[in-house]
Amino acid sequence: MKFITKIGQKVGDFMLKKELKSLERSVVFNNFNSALTIGFIFNAMNKEYHSKAKDFINYVEDRGIKTFGIAYVEKSDLIGYLPYKKGVSYFGLDKKNWYGKPIDQGAEEFIKRPFDILIDISLSEIYQVKHIFALSKAKFKICNDSVKTKYADFVLKLDNKDKLELLIEQIIHYLEIIETKK
């Protein structure tokens, strides 16, 4: 079983690399003052992470920025039990092809949106999340130090990789203080 999983991961990485060759995206630094849209990728399997992600999204919305989110759960049949949040769609990790690519209309639509900023607060090494993050047409991508680092424009290296609250604090800090070119 592990052998087949490893083959799937290798094929997934190969296919992702192939898809990235045709990806056209302009990289533009944005902060809270310049961004009109921000996309979020987060974990909805953990109640605490889900709550902190929703609070962060609300914080950004209160600044007048339009937000969208995509979150993952273990199985698709759990999605109906999650609280509704406008602009947020969910996908199940069980909905994937044999090498791990998500098979979900919401994920495909999320990838195509040209967000001013894409923020990954999932703290995840999961292939489906890497796929969505890597192929996103977002102008500016932010994540923690992870397997997604090579697809990001801004990476936060934290001592404690499992500390979502610290990651969110740092993202807010940098998006408030860093100036964009005029």
Image (tube, grey):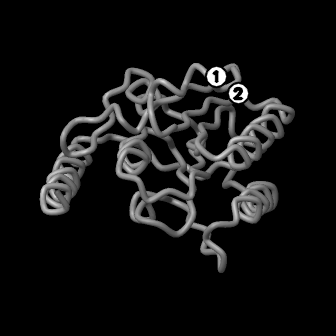
Amino acid tagged 2: Lys
Asked if marks 1 and 2 touch (Cβ < 8 Å), the reply is yes
Name the spot of residue 170 as percent of width and height, x first: 75, 64
Task: Categorize mark 2 by other alpha carbons within 10 Å: few (<14), some (14-19), many (20+).
Answer: some
**Residue 97 vs residue 69, the one in the foreground:** 97
Separation of disc 1 and disc 2 at Cα? 9 Å
* Residue located at (22% from left, 56% from top): 9
Give the residue at x 50% y 56%.
124
In this figure, which residue is indicated by the disc labeled 1? Answer: 87
Q: Position of residue 105 (x, y in %)?
A: 38, 21
Residue type at mark 1: give it: Gly
The residue indicated by pointer 2 is: 66
In the image, residue 86 sits, relative to residue 15, either above or below, namely: above
Instruction: Tell me the SS state at disc 1.
Output: loop
Depth check, mark 1 against mark 2: the one in front is 1
Asked if 180 appears above or below 44 in the picture, the reply is below
Residue at 62% across, 26% down? 88
Q: In the rendered structure, which disc, 1 or 2, sits on the residue that comes first in sequence? A: 2
Reply above or below: 38 against 129. Answer: above
Q: Is residue 179 left or right of residue 141?
A: right
Left or right: residue 145 versus residue 166 is left
Looking at the picture, tell me which residue is in the foreground, 124 or 30.
124
